[in-house]
Image (tube, rainbow, N blue to C red):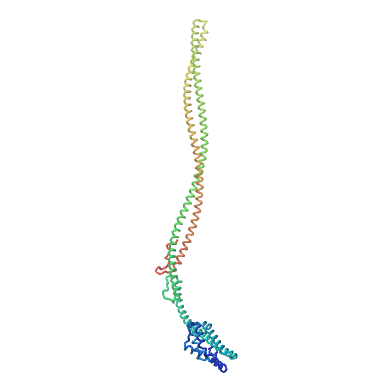
């Protein structure tokens, strides 16, 4: 940046002479203008100190006469810095400088009311001096700002270098910790103090590493529990599979046995139905036999009655033979009395007597036969009555058997129906058991796969080390399937 001294040169010749004349007219207004300018940023100021008035008089004379030399630039820069530090550069330009320019312009107008040509020349000279003063003020501010910026840049570069060195050191420490963490050492902690801006990173890293260590410990314990649980599940699933297979085999055998029992009961039911028909037929036949026996009893009674009548007839024949024999005997006696004349009659009487004797003998035999026949008929009647009673008893038993067989047939049909339903249920159970067996087999395969995956997880966890714990995950080989 070029120096302000090289841009602003002191006035010479007519310009300087006019400035000296201008200062001669305005010097008496310095106190009033100074008071109004200072009151713009300090309303309580009524009197300007003499020292400040002297400085202001020197500065204003230099502005009017164009005496822009080293002393002016040094003094003006110092004053501007003090005022800017006190009220700020913006207020200095807007308030103080504007009042300063206005008051001096009014003073020029007051002093040159008698000459228009002088007034314009003086105003031009005054404005040039005032704007030169403003330019010096702005340049001084910019120079101060540049100086401050340069100092800040130097300080920033120094601080940046220190920060870069601290950052490099912090990154190196954190990098080593991250490298250890990446290699599986979850117990790593950054204990060395770091610069303040990296302290949060150190704390966050330590917290993250500890949280990761705790999480890995939890994962390790959980993985071990999972392996143990998967082994128990695998064992239980294997047992369940074996029991399911045994149950399926037992159900299959039970189903086959039930099929045979059902067939047997069905045949028994059919046999019972046939037996019911046969029992009904037997009951009918027994009823017919009982009826026949009743008719036989009646016939035997009639035979007994006929035998009694025959006995009576034989008794009549026997009496007739006896009478005939008596008559023949009497006829023989009469024939003997008659002598020769009754000889033929005697022969006839003899024959009649012989015939009567044979008739008597035959009647005797018939009586004997009839007596025997009567005894036999009476015995037959007794037997027929006994047979009738037996047949009645048989009829009652056959009726009871018919009822029992009918009940048995009904029970057999109900048993056949029940066994059919049981057989259907057992077959359904057999199908369900087969499906369960397939599902158990799939579950066993899934459990084995999960067990293998848990082993892989255990191996991955074993890559990490934890302080005081050795490896994060103990060996899970004992849980291997």
Residue most extreme to the left: 468
The residue nearer to you, when weighing 355 against 161, is: 161
Image position of 44 with respect to 315: above or below:
below
Coordinates of residue 128 in the picture (x, y in percent): 56, 88
Q: Residue at x 47, y 87 (%)?
A: 49
Residue most extreme to the front: 114
Coordinates of residue 382 in the picture (x, y in percent): 47, 25
**Residue 8 image-quadrant placement:** bottom right
Q: How many marks?
A: 0
Image position of 190 with respect to 351: above or below:
below
The residue nearer to you, when weighing 83 against 40, is: 40
Coordinates of residue 371 in the picture (x, y in percent): 47, 20
Is any part of residue 190 visible from this angle?
yes
The residue nearer to you, when weighing 190 against 398, is: 190
Is any part of residue 362 visible from this angle?
no
Image position of 160 with respect to 236: above or below:
below
Question: In the rendered image, which quarter contains the C terminus?
Answer: bottom left
Residue most extreme to the right: 117
Coordinates of residue 341 in the picture (x, y in percent): 52, 5
């Amino acid at each position: 940046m070029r120096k302000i001294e090289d841009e602003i040169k002191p006035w010479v010749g007519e310009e300087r002479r006019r400035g000296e004349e201008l200062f001669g007219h305005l010097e008496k207004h310095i106190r009033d203008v100074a008071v109004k300018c200072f009151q713009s940023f300090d309303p309580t100021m009524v009197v300007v100190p003499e020292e400040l008035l002297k400085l202001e008089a020197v500065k204003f004379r230099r502005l009017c006469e164009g005496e822009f030399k080293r002393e002016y630039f040094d003094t003006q820069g110092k004053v501007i810095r003090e005022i800017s530090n006190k009220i700020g550069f913006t207020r200095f330009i807007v308030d103080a400088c504007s009042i300063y320019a206005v008051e001096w312009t009014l003073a020029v107008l007051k002093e040159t009311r008698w000459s228009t040509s002088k007034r314009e020349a003086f105003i031009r000279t005054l404005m040039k001096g005032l704007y030169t003063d403003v330019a010096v003020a702005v340049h001084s501010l910019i120079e101060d700002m540049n100086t401050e910026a340069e100092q800040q840049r130097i300080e920033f570069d120094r601080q940046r270098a220190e920060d870069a060195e601290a950052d490099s050191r912090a990154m190196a420490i954190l990098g080593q910790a991250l490298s250890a963490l990446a290699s599986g050492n979850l117990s790593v902690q950054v204990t060395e103090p770091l610069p303040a801006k990296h302290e949060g990173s150190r704390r966050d890293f330590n917290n993250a590493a500890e949280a990761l260590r705790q999480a890995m410990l939890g994962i390790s314990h959980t993985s071990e529990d999972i392996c143990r649980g998967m082994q128990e599940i695998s064992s239980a699933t294997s047992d369940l599979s074996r029991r399911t297979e045994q149950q399926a085999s037992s159900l299959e055998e039970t189903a086959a046995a039930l099929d045979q029992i059902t067939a047997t009961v069905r045949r028994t039911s059919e046999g019972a139905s046939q037996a019911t028909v046969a029992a009904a037929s037997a009951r009918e036949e027994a009823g017919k036999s009982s009826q026949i026996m009743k008719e036989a009893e009646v016939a035997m009674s009639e035979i007994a009655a006929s035998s009694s009548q025959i006995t009576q007839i034989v008794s009549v024949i026997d009496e007739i033979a006896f009478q005939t024999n008596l008559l023949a005997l009497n006829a023989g006696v009469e024939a003997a009395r008659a002598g020769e004349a009754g000889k033929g009659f005697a022969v006839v009487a003899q024959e009649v007597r012989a015939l009567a004797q044979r008739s008597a003998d035959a009647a005797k035999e018939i009586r004997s036969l009839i007596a025997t026949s009567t005894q036999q008929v009476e015995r037959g009647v007794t037997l027929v009555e006994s047979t009738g009673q037996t047949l009645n008893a048989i009829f009652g038993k056959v009726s009871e058997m018919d009822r029992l067989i009918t009940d048995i047939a009904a029970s057999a049909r109900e048993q056949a129906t029940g066994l059919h339903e049981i057989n259907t249920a057992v077959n359904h159970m057999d199908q369900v058991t087969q499906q369960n067996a397939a599902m158990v087999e799939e579950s066993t395969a899934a459990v084995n796969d999960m067990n293998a995956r848990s082993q892989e997880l255990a191996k991955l966890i074993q890559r990490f080390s934890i302080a005081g714990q050795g490896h994060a995950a103990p060996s899970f080989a004992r849980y291997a399937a």
